[in-house]
Image (cartoon, rainbow, N blue to C red):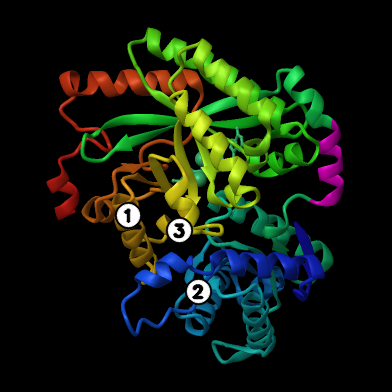
């Protein structure tokens, strides 16, 4: 995370981040091949911004104008922002604060917009015939589309605004830069001991088969319950674990725990494949491959591995050979985050994968974007042509679910069905799902006839 006061000036690192993200967002050639003749790509809105504007001199204005008129000031500011940014989502979030969210092609779009707003707000405002200064402070958070949870974006924007108050100038936080260096160092030191100290735990997120209307499988996601920091999400420690060589032990710990939890789930009468995420690094690690295969075989476990295409590109020969070893012992292979990294039709064809998961960056804005439905549709057709089933990640709304159903998507995963939950909550989820048809006439979130989604 980089904090920049007043202006957003991309550092060399940040520019690299932007460039590599641009490269990652560049449509895979295979999709380019599938676009209709004469198709002109729409400019990619690759960044999302969440901003808070606060009337910093509200108290002084209220003293002068009186409470009733002062209470309408936030609405005046709202109208100014909404008029300047017609495509932004603008809401008044209190007497003094306005929130607005919008997308841009690069982080520089945020800088330009904040400059325009600062200029607009610096001119005295006509309030019932008197001209007053509207001193406004901005706090903003910026992240690549789909890369950051909305809640985190909101928290960072709030914290940027608090800091803007202290420093009396606007503050922007770029969340694409990960954890600050100091944090990374500290976390690195602590990570090694975290597994041994029992600080890691798993959450499970179900995947639902759209046509069969049943829970198809689940994905295990690792979390770190840090003794002083609270919950640390994988985005903040998986790359560290890779850097310090802890990803192998962490993944084997995950596999052991999943095997144990799968037994518990089976004892409840549920026979589900559970997927775990495998870092690219491990695809070239012979010792890991042998140990993982042995654990799965010895326990007759129903396990799937989620891998990204990018992880195969580093050393395709050994990655493909090892993936074949996994497949030979019955491990299901799913391609994760499809479309977010570098795609190659040549590798896609060679991978022994049964499932392709479309990255949530294309799904989150499925019903509000022009371009994402085209990509999702082509990807579903492509995967089906390669005899793979398709899972859409990041399904948060019924509208997205309806569209995906019509497009022929096989499985869905996302907050609409369930957030990642503890093993106990997941067991309860499975129990509720079984009981519902007999005890409850109301269908569950996903147990609806296809006709429902098609009409809705
Ligand atoms: P992933 O494998 O693509 O996992 C899906 C991520 O999307 C999870 O974030 C999940 O919480 C989030 N998600 C699920 N449904 C929705 C939704 O409807 N909306 C939104 N906005 N997000 C949704 P999480 O748990 O933070 O994991 C992030 C990434 O960390 C994972 O992405 C995976 O690449 C990695 N990861 C997680 N556990 C492990 C692990 O055990 N080993 C390795 N190597 N990587 C892991
Ligand atoms: Mg995954
Ligand atoms: Mg994914």
Q: Residue furthest top?
A: 267
Q: Which residue matches tag 3?
A: 345
Q: Is residue 421 visible?
A: yes
Does the image show residue 250? no
Q: Pointer 2 and pointer 3: residues touching (CB < 8 Å)?
A: no
Q: Quadrant of residue 289?
A: top right
Which residue is the site of mark 1?
380
Q: Is residue 307 left or right of residue 63?
A: left
- Whole-percent x and y of residue 372? 39, 65
Q: Residue at x 50, y 11 (%)?
A: 299
Q: Residues within 10 Å of mark 2 (few under 14, many from 20)?
A: some
Q: Split into 4 quadrants, where in the image is the N terminus? A: bottom right
Residue ID for mark 2: 44
CA–CA distance in space, label 2 to label 1: 21 Å
Measured in 3D between alpha carbons, the distance from the residue under mark 2 to the one under mark 3, in whole angstroms, is: 22 Å
- The region drawn magenta spans 180-189
């Amino acid at each position: 995370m980089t904090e920049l006061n007043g202006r957003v000036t991309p550092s060399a690192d940040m520019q690299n981040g932007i460039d590599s993200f641009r490269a990652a967002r560049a449509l895979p050639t295979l999709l380019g091949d599938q676009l209709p003749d004469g198709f002109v790509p729409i400019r990619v809105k690759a960044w999302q911004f969440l901003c808070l504007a606060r009337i910093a001199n509200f108290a002084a204005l209220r003293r002068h104008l009186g409470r009733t008129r002062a209470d309408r000031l936030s609405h005046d500011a709202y109208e100014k922002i909404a008029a300047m940014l017609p495509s932004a989502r603008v809401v008044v979030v209190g007497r003094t604060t306005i929130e607005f969210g919008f997308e841009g092609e690069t982080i520089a779009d945020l800088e330009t917009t904040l400059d325009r707003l600062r200029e607009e707000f610096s001119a005295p405002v006509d309030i019932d015939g008197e001209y007053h200064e509207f001193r406004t402070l901005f706090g903003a958070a910026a992240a690549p589309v789909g890369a950051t949870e909305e809640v985190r974006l909101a928290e960072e924007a709030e914290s940027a605004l608090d800091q803007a108050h202290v420093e009396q100038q606007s503050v922007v936080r770029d969340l694409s830069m990960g954890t600050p260096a100091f944090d990374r160092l500290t976390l690195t030191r602590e990570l090694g001991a975290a597994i041994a100290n029992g600080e890691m735990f798993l959450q499970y997120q179900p995947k639902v088969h759209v046509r069969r209307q049943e829970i198809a499988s689940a994905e295990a996601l690792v979390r770190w319950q840090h003794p002083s920091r609270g919950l640390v999400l994988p985005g903040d420690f998986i790359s560290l674990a890779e850097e310090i060589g802890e990803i192998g032990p962490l993944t084997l710990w995950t596999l052991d725990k999943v095997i144990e939890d799968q037994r518990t789930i089976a004892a409840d009468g549920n026979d589900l494949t559970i997927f775990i995420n495998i870092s690219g690094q491990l695809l070239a690690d012979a010792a890991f491959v042998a140990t993982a295969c042995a654990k799965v075989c010895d326990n007759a476990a129903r396990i799937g591995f989620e891998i990204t295409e990018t992880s195969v590109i580093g050393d395709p020969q050994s990655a493909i050979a090892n993936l074949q070893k996994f497949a030979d012992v019955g491990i299901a292979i799913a391609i994760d985050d499809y479309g977010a990294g570098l795609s190659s039709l040549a590798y896609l064809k060679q991978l022994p994968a049964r499932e392709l998961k479309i990255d949530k960056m294309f799904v989150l804005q499925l019903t509000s974007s022009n371009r994402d439905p085209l990509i999702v549709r082509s990807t579903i057709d492509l995967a089906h042509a390669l005899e793979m089933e398709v899972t859409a990640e990041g399904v948060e709304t019924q509208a997205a679910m309806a569209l995906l159903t019509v497009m022929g998507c096989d499985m869905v995963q996302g907050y609409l069905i369930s957030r990642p939950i503890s093993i106990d909550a997941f067991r309860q989820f499975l129990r509720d799902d079984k009981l519902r048809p007999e005890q409850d006439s109301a269908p569950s979130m996903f147990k609806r006839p296809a006709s429902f989604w098609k009409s809705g």
